[in-house]
Amino acid sequence: MVITIDGPAGSGKSTAARNLARALGIAYLDTGATYRAVTLKALREGVDLEDADALADAAGRARIHLSPEPAATRVWLDGEDVSETIRSEAVSEKSYYPARSPQVREVLVALQRRIGAELGSFVAEGRDQGTVVFPDADVKFYLVADASERAKRRCAELRARGESCNEQKVRTAIERRDRRDRTRDVAPLIKPDGAIEVDTTDRDVAAMDAALLAHVRERLDKDAGGGPAP
Ligand code: DC
C-alpha cells in the first residue's frame, strides 16, 4: 500500500504521516529530509547555491540514508547522523535552492523511488509525492492549515528544543517558503488529482490522525468491493 501526504510547511504532514504509518504498521518516508541533507552538504562545502551544476554535483555525491524509527526518521549524510542539524532554520531557509533545481530533483526523486521500492508499503510525505514521485499511490492526501497556526506549531517545536522563537518572523518565513514551493517551475506544490484535502487548522493531532485513518479505511473498503451501504 502506498499513501502520499503533500502540503505546505507546518500543515501537519510529518506528524500525520508518522502516525498513519504507525497505525497501519507500514513505513514512513520523509522526503523533505533528502532535500535538507543536500542543503546541508552544499552549505558545508561552501557550494554557491545559485550554481545549479555545483548543487547537482553535490546532490549526486551525497550519500543519504534514511532510517525510519518510531519517534522520528534518522538521517545520515556521508556516514554522519545529521538528524538534528538538518532541522535548523538555516537549513530550512536555504533548502529552497536544491528544491527548485530540476537536476537535484531528478537525483532525489530517483532516490525516493528506490527507497519506496525497498519499503513496499509506506506513507510518503513531501510536496510532490502524489503528483510526481508516486502518482499511482493508493490514497493521496493534501493537508492545509492557516499560516498563523503553522507558525504557532513551528515555534512550539523550536521552543521544545530550547530555542527562542518569534511567531511573526516565523510566519513571514513560512509564507515566503509557501510562495517559493507553489511558484517554482519544477514540481510545484499543488493538490494532486484525486487527493483528499484535510484542513488541520482547528484539529488537534488525535482528530487529524483519526480523520486520515478513516479515509484510508473507507478507500480500502471500497477497493475490497464493499462500497458504502445503499
Ligand atoms: O518538508 P520539509 O520542510 O522538510 O522540506 C524541506 C525542503 O524541501 C522545503 O524547501 C521543501 C522541499 N521539498 C520538496 O521540494 N519536495 C518534497 N517532496 C519534500 C520537500
Image: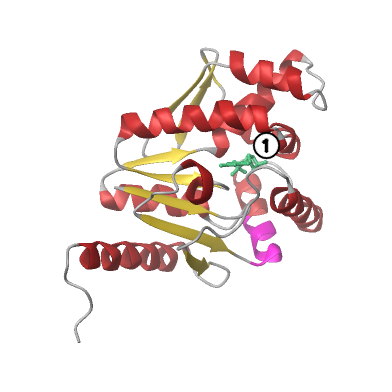
Tell me if I can see residue 56 in this picture: yes
Q: Which residues are magenta?
A: 146-153
**Residue 83 appears anywhere in the view:** no
Q: Is residue 122 left or right of residue 141?
A: left
121, above or below 82, in the image: below
Q: Tell me: residue 64, above or below residue 74.
A: above
Q: Which residue is mark 1?
A: 99
Q: Residue at x 47, y 53 (%)?
A: 5
Element marked by disc 1: helix
Can you tell me whether the CB of the residue at mark 1 lies under 8 Å from the nearest atom of ligand 1? yes
Relative height, residue 56 to residue 151 (above, below)? above
Is 10 displayed left or right of 139 in the figure?
right
- Name the one closer to the observer, 52 or 73: 52
Q: Is residue 50 left or right of residue 153?
A: right
Tell me residue 153's x, y (percent): 62, 57
Majority secondary structure of the magenta segment?
helix
Which residue shows up at 61% across the image and 32% down it? 105
Pick the quarter of the image with the C terminus.
bottom left
What residue do we see at 71% from left, 65% from top? 148
Q: Is residue 89 above or below residue 40?
A: below
What is the crowding at mark 1: few (fewer than 14 residues within 10 Å), some, or many (at least 20)? many
The verdict on residue 168 being magenta is no
- The quadrant where ligand 1 appears is top right
Q: Position of residue 134 (x, y in %)?
A: 44, 44
Q: Which sits in the foreground, 198 or 118?
A: 118
Amino acid type, mark 1: Ala
x, y percentage for residue 191? Answer: 56, 60
